[in-house]
Amino acid sequence: MSASEVPIRDRLFVGQDDQPYDFYLCPPLDTNNDLIQMVVEHGGSVVDDLSLECIVISSEGYDVPENLKDAHIYSYKAIEDSVANGIQMDFAHYLIHAPPPEPDFQQQEITAAEPQVEPKQNGSNNDNNDDEVNPFLDIDPEYPTEVPNSDPPPIGAESGLSADLPTVQQSKATAVFPKHHGVKYFTPEEDAFLLEEIRKRPWLGFKGHQIYKEICELSFFQKRERTSASLRERIRTLKYHVGYVYSADKDHKLLVDEDGKYVRSFLIKACVQPFTAADDFGLCKVVYGKLSPKPNSTGFETVYFPTNFFDKYGAMFPQHSPESWRQRFKNYLAIFGVANYLKYFIMEKQQGNDPLPSNSANRDWIKARRSLRKTDGPRLYFPNIPDEDQFIDDNIDTILVPELEGKNLDVFTPMAWTENKEDGNEAPPSKRQRVSNSTEPTAPESITRFVDTPTTYFREATFAKFYEKEGEPIDLDEVIPRKDSFLTDVANALKLEELTASNMLKALNKVGVKKYYAMFLIYRCGSKEWLVQKSIKRYVETNGQELLCISPGAWSNKAIDWLELKNKHLNDLLKAYHGEEDFNIQVAAFKKSHSINL
DNA sequence: TCACACACCCACACACCAA
DNA sequence: ATTGGTGTGTGGGTGTGTG
C-alpha cells in the first residue's frame, strides 16, 4: 500500500521538512493493515527496505532479529497512541530496544574515569540521581518519564515532545543506527532528555554555555559521551525550538501546579540584555542634561556622579541593573563621549537613519579612543559631527525616544551636591535647584509643560475591584508567544462600522481583553480606538507593567492627579497636552462618573 | 553539495573586588 | 561610596570533519 492510495487526514507523521516519516514494521506487524493504514493516513509511509533511513517498529516481547540488534526499536503503540491522541507522542517513551553499548567505549569509561559503582548524589535536586542502568536497555533512570515519586513531578508524562517534534524528525535516521564513530547523531530520547533538562533550568536561558555544561554532567549524557558543546550545538541545530520552559521561583525552585505538574511558561528570557542605541541615548541625555559633563584638555569629559545616581537610574530604567548601567557608562559612553554620542545620535535621526549603540557606532574609532585614553595621546574627534554643543541643546528635545517617554528625570538633578555632598540623600522636590542648563522647575506655577508618566495601577476603586476579582487584564502567558498575531487581532477587532463603546467592548473581549480592562481603556482614552489599541500594545510590550499608552488623549493617573489639584495653571498645561476640546470632554466625563474628586 | 556534530573564537553584558 | 580593573559567562559567528 502506498500513501497515495489513502487520503491523508493529518500530518501526524510528517517532519518539518515535509518528508513523511518512514516506518519499518517488523514482522508480523508488516501485515497489520490497520497499523499500516494508521501510518499512511497520518502522513507517514511504510518501507520494507532496512537500508533506508527509517524508524523501526515492533512489539514488546518479540525477539529482536540479529540484523536489528544495533537498531533503536519502538513499540507499535507509539503509532496507535499518537493517532488516538491526535498529537505525535514522544517516541522515546516507546523505546523497546536499543543497541548495546559499544564495549571499547564503555570499558574505557569505566576503567579510566569512573569507579565501578558511581557514588549516588543524594541532593535535594532529583536531576542527578544515578541508579544502576540496565546496559541492554538504553533508557536511563534520569530520563524524564522515568523520574518516579520524586518531589518535582514527572515531566515527560504530560509534556512529552508533542509539538516540539523537530527533534524526532531531525534525528530519525540516527535513531535507527546511531553511529559511535565519526558523526554521532542525536537520538529522539537524547533530544527529549535535553529539552526537558533545558526547561528545568529557565534561569540559565538556553543560548549560553553554562546550561549545557550542567546538563552534560548528567550521567545520561556522560554515558553517551556528549560534550557540552555538542549539546549546545544540537539546540542551535534545532533552531532553539524549546517551546516553553518550566516556571521557577527566585530560588530556582520549579513551580508545581495543583496536579503536581511543572508549570509551563512561554516567557523565555535571555540572560543578557544588549544595550540599544536608545539605552545609550537615554543615559547620555540624562548625564548631559543633569550632570553637565565638562570637556577636559584631552578631549574626554569629566562627570561627577551624585550618590546613588546609577541606583536611581536602574530603578527608573530597569532593562539593565544599576551596575550594568554604570559599566555601560564606564566602558563605552565615557570612551565615546556623552556629547559625541548625542551629536551622532541626533545627526543619524535627522538623516532618517537608525543610530547604532555606542559599542558599534564606529568600532575602529572607539577602539582608538580607548587606547588614547590610557596613553594620553592627541585628541581624536568623532567624524562628521558639529563642534558646538549648541547643536545638542537645539535638537535634543526634538528626538523622541519611546524609552524616555513619560519618565520624570527630575530625580537626577543633583541638589547643590558640589557644596554639601555628604548629606546627599534624596533631594526633596521643593529643594531642586538649577544646577545644569536644563533643570526642571518644581513649583506648580513654574512648570511649563505636562510630561506624562506610565499608569501602572487602577486608580478607580471600580476597576481596582475588578482587577482583584478577575485578575490580569490580558492573559499574557497566552498572548506573548503570539504577540504579533494578538496585536493584529486587536487591530482587526477595532475595525468596527459603529465605534460605540459597547461594540468595542464586545470586540475586544472576543480577542482576549477582559471586559473591565476594555472599559478602563475606553474610559481613559475617551473611546478613541487608536489609543485603546496603542494602550493594549503598550501593555503587552511592557509585560503588563503599563496599563495605558502615553499619548495626548490617553488620560494617565498622573493627569488625573493633576486634575484633582484643581490648579488653573496645571489645568492649562493639561489642556495644552491633551488639547482643549479633549480636556473639556474628558473632564465632563470624569465628573459624570464621580470616580474622581473634581 | 548539504546537513549535522563538534569545536573554537570573540565582543560584550554583567558581576565582583580592591583601593 | 565611588572608581577602575578584572574575571566569567552569554550569544552568535564560523571553521572543520563526516556521512
Image (spheres, coloured by chain):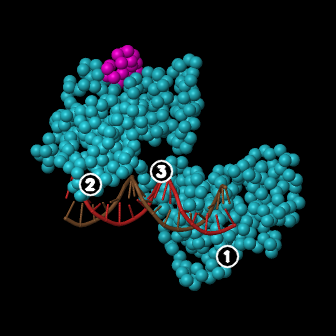
Chain colours: A cyan, B brown, C red
Q: Which mark is residue A224?
A: none
Of A135 and A563, nearer the camera is A135
Disc 1 marks which amino acid? Pro
Badge 3 and badge 1 in a common chain: yes
Disc 2 marks which amino acid? Leu
Image-quadrant location for residue A105:
bottom right
Secondary structure, magenta segment, majority class: helix
**Chain ID for label 1?**
A
Q: What secondary structure is marked by label 1?
A: loop
Image-quadrant location for residue A386:
top left
> Residue A361 at x, y = what percent?
38, 45
Q: Are marks 3 and 1 in contact (CB under 8 Å)?
A: no
Does residue A96 appear left or right of residue C10 in this picture? right
**Chain ID for label 3?**
A
> Residue A242 at x, y = what percent?
57, 53
Q: Which residue is mark 1?
A: A101
Q: Which residue is mark 3?
A: A269
Q: Nearer the viewer, mark 1 or mark 2?
A: 2
Residue at 56% of width from left, 41% of height from top? A482
